[in-house]
Image: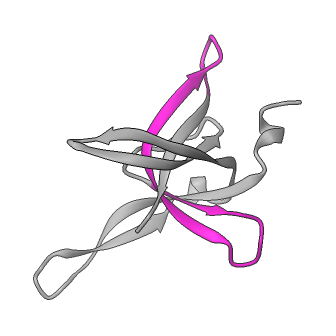
Amino acid sequence: MSYTSLLINSASVYRYTAGAADGYGKPKETWAVVPALSDIACRIMPVSGVEVKVGAELVVADYKLFLGDVTVTEQDRVNIYWGTVDAWVMYEILLVMNRQDGIDSHHKECLLRTAR
């Protein structure tokens, strides 16, 4: 059994882009899909309250995401398909961990929380 055969979910990675300015001149928060990272294989699993320090704030991660060797950062969001009709859920990436196979990068593990 290979690692890729365990990736049973589907995800798309989104990056922040500055949208049109609102009435106060502040750009609206807009998330655009990264074309190269659309509909990629992944696996998501719940974790029991892993604490992650984000800046000066302590945040609790609710899920762990396994991806192939793709380029994602903590500033991205990920939209994951859970396998049923209209079952897409958006998550914030709190921490990206690069796992190696002894020679090179093998896969990424990301800690997530539901985007609010």
Q: Quadrant of residue 95?
A: top left
Q: Provide the residue span drawn in magenta.
A: 77-106
Query: Looking at this view, is 115 or 67 the one in front?
Result: 115
Residue at the (65%, 17%) spot, across then down: 101
Position above or below: 27 against 115: below
| Farthest left residue in view | 24
Query: Looking at this view, is 29 or 111 the one in front?
Result: 111
Whether 105 is among the magenta residues is yes
Residue at the (77%, 72%) spot, across then down: 84
Counting from the top left corner in percent of width and height, residue 16 is at 36, 62
Position above or below: 91 against 72: below
Query: Which quadrant of the rendered structure holds the C terminus?
Result: bottom left
Q: Is residue 14 left or right of residue 57?
A: right
Whether 104 is among the magenta residues is yes
Query: Which quadrant of the rendered structure holds the N terminus?
Result: top right
Q: Is residue 2 left or right of residue 51?
A: right
Q: Is residue 10 left or right of residue 91?
A: right
| Farthest bottom residue in view | 23
